[in-house]
Image (cartoon, rainbow, N blue to C red):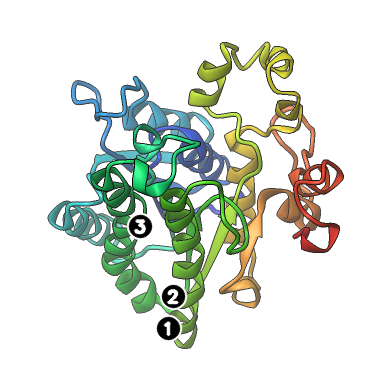
Amino acid sequence: MKPLEGHIAVVAGATRGAGRGIAEMLGEAGATVYVTGRSSRGQLSDMGRTETIEETAELVTARGGRGIPVRVDHTVEEEVRALFEQVRREQDGRLDLLVNDVWGGDSLMEWGKMFWERPLADGLLMQRRAVHSHMITSYYGAPLLVANRRGLIVEITDGWDYRYRGNLYYSLAKISAIHLAEAMAEELRPHHVAAVAVTPGFLRSEAMLDHFGVTKDNWRDAAEKDPHFMMSETPHYVGRAVAALAADPRIMDKSGQALTSWGLSDEYGFADEDGSRPHWGNYAAEQGFYAETDKP
């Protein structure tokens, strides 16, 4: 039996990147996964990407789970409410896992600019997409978990602490996800529901492959432009991290923590799809990106 056979999951923001990798790996573990996002066949979002929730759902099913695509704008309360009403109706009230991976901030970013040099509207919209959407989704998803007195909420973020991340608006969004997990953990604890934040390392997403002009097959060629890319990981790596957490009977011991794909690989023993186990924490310490004592 697969470890998540019979489990019901919602992955919010599963169209591409980490969200798609997480949905796929939950499918690999046997879960039924509601795949949500704004990009649907015939109705793409403003992200300028071609990936769709239907494609992700098909990948989930191909992995051995069951993928169910539902088009949802997670900044729209009525759409989120309808999503969880659908889950409640179709799954007899059961929900085991909620993953908040909605981002939508790439087009709003401009590295190297101070916060007062960028349009305030872009910074506020980033918080709406990457923070408010998570709050709305958890608000309507948590009651299903609480009613079953078990389950897990995962906040996908960038980084594991509260340090500045090179851009005020970006930092605020990513740090907020960590604190959402920490704060939700406190309020969910009496109901035996856990909440954690999880970060991937240097993510080899579809957008990043395009940025470097490489593919899944020749991705190492990107090291000519950025040697750090050799320590990158596929979205399946953080996906297996989330699947391992969802299957852990002692998940409450981790509730409230900010975790990493590489740290969870050390603990649970899973590998990336090519059998490697990239460890961004060790690599970043060796490169002097942060002090050894700061390593997660």
Front label number (1 vs 3): 3
The image quarter in which residue 173 lies: bottom left
Residue 163 is left or right of residue 288, and the answer is left
Q: Are marks 1 and 2 in contact (CB under 8 Å)?
A: yes
Q: Write down the residue under mark 3.
A: 131
Tell me the quarter of the image containing the C terminus.
bottom right
- Label drawn at residue 2: none
The answer to which image quadrant residue 276 occupies is top right
Instruction: Decide: is 148 above or below 241.
Output: below
**Are there few (<14), some (14-19), or many (20+) residues within 10 Å of tag 1?**
few
User: How packed is label 2: few (under 14 Cα within 10 Å), some, or many (20 or more)?
Assistant: many
Q: Residue at x 78, y 44 (%)?
A: 284
Question: Which SS class for mark 2?
Answer: helix
Q: Residue furthest left?
A: 78
Question: Residues under labels 1 and 2: Cα distance?
Answer: 5 Å
**Dot 3: element:** helix
Q: Name the residue: 54% across, 66% down.
A: 196
Name the amino acid, label 3.
Answer: Val
Residue 69 or residue 109, whichever sits in front = 109
Amino acid beneath label 2: Met
Residue tagged 1: 187
| Amino acid type of the residue tagged 1 in the rendering | Glu
Q: CA distance from mark 1 to mark 3?
A: 18 Å
Residue 184, disc: 2
